C-alpha cells in the first residue's frame, strides 16, 4: 500500500540518519555536541569515583587507627602503641600482596604511567582485571600506612571508566583518547578542587598534546569533577596559608632561581631513589627466593618500623605539608622529614604496594622549600619575604619536576592554596626545576617508569609508533600479489637475516637500516623442532608507508 511504503521510507531514512550520526559520534566525536554530553557523564562518574575513593580511605583509616579526623592521622598516631603502628602496615602489605599475586599477571599495581601508555599505544584502553585489583591495592595501601598518594590511583580508576565507555561505544583511537582525557581531568579536579589544573593535567601529562578539538569536552568533564568535590567538601582550598606570602620581587627572585635548581635535584634524587629501591628489592627477592606476594608485606613491616619514630610518613601526608606551608616546623625538622619521606615513598613503591607520587611530591617539595626559605631569610632578613613563600614555591617545583608537568602543577599549587599573588616566584622555581630534572631523567617519573619497561614514549611519537605495528600486519603473505620470492626468503633465513612473526616494526626497522635489503622474511618457530616456518615477507617500503601514515594521523590529531 502507498501508506506502508511511505512509512517504510521514512523509517529507512531515520535509520540511515541514526547510523550516520552514530558513525560521526564514534569517529568524529570531539566535534559533535552529543560528545560533550558523554564527556559530562564521564566527568560526573569520574568525580564520584574520586570522591568515593577518598571517603573509603578515610573510613578504613578511621576504623584501623581509631582516629576521629583522618586529616590529623600523623599526630594522632604518636599516641598509639608502637606494636599497632607496626602491625597495621604489615597486614595491609600482606593483603595487597595476595591481591596483586592472584589478579595481576606481573604482580605490579597499575597507576598513571599505565594510563599514559594506554593513551599513546592502546587507543585509550586499559586492562580491566588488573586495574580493579590495583584500585583495591591502592585503597588498602593508603589506608594502612603506605606512604604514597591517592591521586595516581584516582586517575587510573577514572581512566578505567573511560576505557569501559570507549569499548561500549566502540569508538576509534582519537575519540577513545579524548574520553580518557575527560576522565582524568575530572578525577584530578575532584581530588584537588582544581578545575583549571585538572583540564591542563589531562592534556599535558596524559594526552601529551593540546589539541583544540579535545579542549572543550575535557573542560566540561573537569568542571563536573569540581562540582562533585564542592558538593561534598564545599568551595575550600586544600591548604590554608598565612597572609604573609609577600615577595620582594627584584631582590628575592635570584633566590627562587636557586630554589628551582635545588628542587630539581631533590626531584631527581626522589625519582632515582624509587627506581634504585625497586631494583634492590627485585634483586633481593630473586636472591632470597621470596614469593612475589610477600614483597608488599615486607615493605609494610619496614614502613611500620619507620612510622614508629616518624608517624608523619603515614598516608598522603597533607598534615605535614600544611605544617610546612604555614611555617610550623623547624629547619632541622623540615630536612629530616623530607629525607624520611623520600625513604618511605621508595619503600612503598619498591614494595609494589600501590598509590601515586603526587601527594608525596607536594610534601617533599614543601619541606624542601621551607628549609631553603629559613636559610635564605636567615641570611638576608631585610631583603626577604616569608619563609612560607619558599615552601609554596618548593612544593610546586618538586612536584612539577617529578610529574613533568610545569603548567598544570603551577596551577594546581595556586588552586590548592588560593594564593595567586606569588605567581612569579612559583613560576620561576617550577621552570628551572623542570628543565633541570628533564635532563637527568626521561622527562618525568611516569615516562621513566615506562622507559624502564622498554616503552619509549619520552622521545615522542617518532620513537614509539613503530612499536604499535606488528610485522604480521604489514607483511606480504606468500599468496599475496607481489609477494617475495620464497627461494630468496629461505636463503636469507639460512643467513640469519629474518624477523620473528611476534616482532614489531620497532625491531624490524633497525635490521633494514643495517642490512640494506628490500625485504625481510617473517618466520615463526615450530613448537617441536624449533625449525623456522616462513610466514611471509616484510618489505621496507611497506613498513615506511605504515609508519608515515601513523605519523600523519598523529600530527593531524595533535593539530586539530
Image (tube, rainbow, N blue to C red):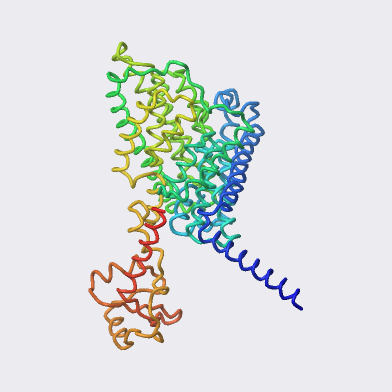
Q: Residue sitting at 60 percent across and 27 percent down? A: 81
Q: Position of residue 352 (x, y in %)?
A: 49, 47
Q: Quadrant of the C terminus?
A: bottom left
* Residue 369 in the figure: left or right of residue 165: left
* Camera-nearest residue between 161 and 441: 161
Q: Is residue 83 above or below residue 135?
A: above
* Residue 397 in the figure: left or right of residue 79: left
Q: Is residue 28 above or below residue 425?
A: below
Q: Residue sitting at 37 percent across and 44 percent down? A: 444
Location of residue 510 by image quarter: bottom left
Quick one: which residue is furthest to the front in this view?
2
Q: Residue sitting at 44 percent across and 18 percent down? A: 327
Residue 97 seen in this snapshot: no
Q: Position of residue 328 (x, y in %)?
A: 46, 18
Q: Is residue 174 above or below residue 238?
A: below
Q: Quadrant of the N terminus?
A: bottom right
Location of residue 426 by image quarter: top left
Quick one: which residue is furthest to the top in this view?
382
Total numbered circles: 0
* Camera-nearest residue between 151 and 354: 151
Q: Position of residue 492 (x, y in %)?
A: 28, 81
Q: Position of residue 60 (x, y in %)?
A: 64, 36
* Residue 450 in the figure: left or right of residue 230: left
* Camera-nearest residue between 23 and 322: 23
Q: Is residue 515 above or below residue 320?
A: below
Amino acid at each position: 500500500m502507498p501508506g506502508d511504503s511511505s512509512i517504510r521510507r521514512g523509517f529507512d531514512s531515520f535509520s540511515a540518519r541514526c547510523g550516520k550520526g552514530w558513525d560521526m559520534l564514534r569517529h568524529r566525536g570531539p566535534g559533535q555536541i552529543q560528545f560533550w554530553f558523554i564527556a559530562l557523564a564521564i566527568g560526573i562518574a569520574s568525580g564520584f569515583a574520586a570522591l568515593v575513593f577518598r571517603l573509603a580511605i578515610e573510613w578504613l583509616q578511621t576504623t584501623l587507627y581509631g582516629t576521629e579526623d583522618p586529616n590529623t592521622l600523623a599526630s594522632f598516631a604518636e599516641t598509639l602503641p608502637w606494636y599497632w603502628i607496626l602491625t597495621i602496615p604489615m597486614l595491609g602489605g600482606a593483603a595487597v600482596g595476595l591481591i596483586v599475586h592472584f589478579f595481576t599477571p606481573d604482580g605490579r599495581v597499575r597507576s598513571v604511567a599505565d594510563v599514559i601508555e594506554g593513551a599513546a599505544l592502546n587507543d585509550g584502553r586499559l586492562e580491566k582485571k588488573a586495574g580493579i585489583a590495583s584500585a583495591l591495592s591502592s585503597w588498602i595501601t593508603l589506608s594502612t600506612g603506605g606512604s604514597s598518594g591517592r591521586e595516581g590511583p584516582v586517575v587510573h580508576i577514572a581512566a578505567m571508566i573511560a576505557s569501559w565507555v570507549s569499548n561500549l561505544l566502540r569508538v576509534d583511537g582519537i575519540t577513545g583518547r579524548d574520553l580518557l582525557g575527560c576522565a582524568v581531568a575530572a578525577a584530578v579536579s575532584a581530588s584537588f578542587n582544581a578545575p583549571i589544573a585538572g583540564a591542563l593535567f589531562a592534556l599535558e601529562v596524559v594526552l601529551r598534546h593540546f589539541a583544540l578539538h579535545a579542549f572543550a569536552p575535557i573542560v566540561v568533564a573537569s568542571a563536573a569533577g569540581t562540582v562533585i568535590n564542592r558538593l561534598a567538601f564545599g568551595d575550600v582550598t586544600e591548604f590554608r596559608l598565612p597572609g604573609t606570602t609577600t615577595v620582594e620581587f627584584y631582590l628575592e627572585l635570584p633566590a627562587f632561581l636557586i630554589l628551582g635548581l635545588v628542587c630539581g635535584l631533590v626531584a631527581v634524587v626522589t625519582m632515582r631513589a624509587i627506581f634504585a629501591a625497586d631494583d634492590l628489592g627485585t634483586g633481593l627477592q630473586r636472591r632470597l627466593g621470596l614469593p612475589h606476594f610477600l614483597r608488599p608485606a615486607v615493605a609494610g613491616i619496614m614502613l611500620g618500623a619507620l612510622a614508629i619514630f616518624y608517624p608523619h610518613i603515614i598516608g598522603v601526608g597533607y598534615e605535614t605539608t600544611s605544617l610546612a606551608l604555614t611555617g610550623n616546623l623547624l629547619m632541622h625538622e623540615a630536612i629530616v622529614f623530607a629525607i624520611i619521606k623520600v625513604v618511605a615513598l621508595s619503600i612503598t613503591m619498591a614494595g609494589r604496594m600501590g598509590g601515586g607520587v603526587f601527594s608525596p611530591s607536594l610534601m617533599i617539595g614543601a619541606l624542601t622549600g621551607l628549609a631553603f626559605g629559613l636559610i635564605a631569610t636567615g641570611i638576608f632578613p631585610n631583603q626577604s619575604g616569608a619563609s612560607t613563600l619558599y615552601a609554596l614555591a618548593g612544593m610546586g617545583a618538586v612536584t612539577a619536576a617529578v610529574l613533568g608537568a610545569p603548567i598544570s602543577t603551577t596551577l594546581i599549587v595556586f588552586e590548592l592554596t588560593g594564593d595567586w599573588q606569588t605567581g612569579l616566584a612559583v613560576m620561576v622555581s617550577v621552570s628551572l626545576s623542570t628543565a633541570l630534572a628533564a635532563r637527568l631523567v626521561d622527562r618525568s617519573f611516569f615516562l621513566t617508569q615506562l622507559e624502564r619497561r622498554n616503552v619509549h614514549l619520552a622521545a615522542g611519537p617518532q620513537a614509539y609508533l613503530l612499536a604499535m605495528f606488528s610485522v604480521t600486519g604489514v607483511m606480504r603473505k606468500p599468496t599475496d600479489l607481489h609477494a617475495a620470492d620464497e627461494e630468496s626468503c629461505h636463503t636469507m633465513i639460512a643467513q640469519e637475516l629474518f624477523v620473528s612473526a611476534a616482532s614489531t616494526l620497532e625491531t624490524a626497522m633497525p635490521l633494514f637500516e643495517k642490512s640494506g635489503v628490500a625485504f625481510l622474511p617473517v618466520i615463526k618457530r615450530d613448537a617441536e623442532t624449533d625449525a623456522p616456518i616462513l610466514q611471509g615477507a616484510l618489505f621496507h617500503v611497506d613498513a615506511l608507508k605504515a609508519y608515515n601514515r601513523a605519523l600523519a594521523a598523529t600530527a593531524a590529531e595533535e593539530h586539530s
